[in-house]
Image (tube, rainbow, N blue to C red):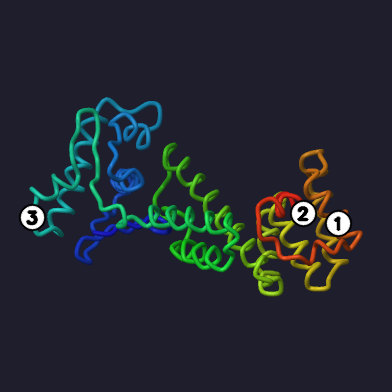
Amino acid sequence: MIARVLGTLDVRCGGRSVVPTAPKPRKVLGLLVLHANHVVSTAALMRELWGEKPPASAATTLQTYILLLRKQLAAALDGGMAEAKATLVTYPGGYMLRLPADAVDVNRFERLCSHGRQALARGEAQEAADTLRAALALWRDDALVDVPNGPLLEVEAVRLRESRLGALEQRIEADLRLGRHHEVLGELAALITEFPLNENLHAQLMLALYRSGRRAQALDVYRKLRMCFINELGLDPSARIHDLHQAVLASEPALDAQITTPVERAGLLGAA
């Protein structure tokens, strides 16, 4: 059995999809997959489906959705309804979907991200780049892109978007440590358009441009970021990226060095 949420909701048993077509049962399944092997309370499921004011029939309707999901599972599992009940388990006050940890793509993503961060902290840039690239390859689209988000799924979607962006920044950092500044220029240019207030991405683009012999463009990146901060927030960018700007202005030799430890990285680039 596999379950994927990093894109469209895709849950399969023996290659057969068990995802219902109706929106509300899809929400239930999505929430159960995201919290696989943990009990999701009935109250949480009802809040996801109906917000703060569930109808009087909410508990009965939720039971109907659970029955529908079990029927989908039973049709795909060799053990029929008995195995379906053992997979989607009723507990006092809630339900739990039992899945092998490696069956869920988000679990694999988070494990690979953890390994990638650890490799980066050890100064093993190639391993970090490869591992984080593998983690990011698990994404097919925005998380649960085909499931209407209620309040709980929206929180999860935001959390996963932030995790994805963090992994992307760390993978780019690993590539910069490997001297791949030319290769990341186009990607970073697109990313700062999508995230115009993200200082980390701007700092990475400034460094990549500087190392590519494009000092004037690196300075222009800072100028545009500063104007965006002032116009949107009424603030200047942080001292960390200001220090990078000053280093670019002075053409400090340290900017050409490959950063291999967290201490060196913090001293030179701050957020980059």
Q: Are marks 3 and 1 in contact (CB under 8 Å)?
A: no
Quadrant location of the N terminus?
bottom left
Distance (Cα) linking label 3 and label 1: 65 Å
Give the residue at mark 3. Answer: 79
x then y, percent, for residue 52: 40, 27
The residue at 61%/63% (across/down) is 174
Give the residue at mark 2. Answer: 268
Crowding at dot 2, Cα within 10 Å, few <14 / some 14-19 / many 20+, comes out as many
The residue at 49%/55% (across/down) is 113
Q: Nearer the viewer, residue 141 or 137?
A: 137
Q: Are marks 1 and 2 in contact (CB under 8 Å)?
A: yes
Q: Give above or below for 153 relative to 192.
A: above
Is residue 180 found left or right of 31 in the rendered image? right
Q: Amino acid at mark 3?
A: Gly
The residue at 43%/44% (across/down) is 149
Name the quadrant containing residue 93: top left
Q: Amino acid at mark 2?
A: Leu
Distance (Cα) linking label 3 and label 2: 59 Å
x then y, percent, for residue 268: 77, 54
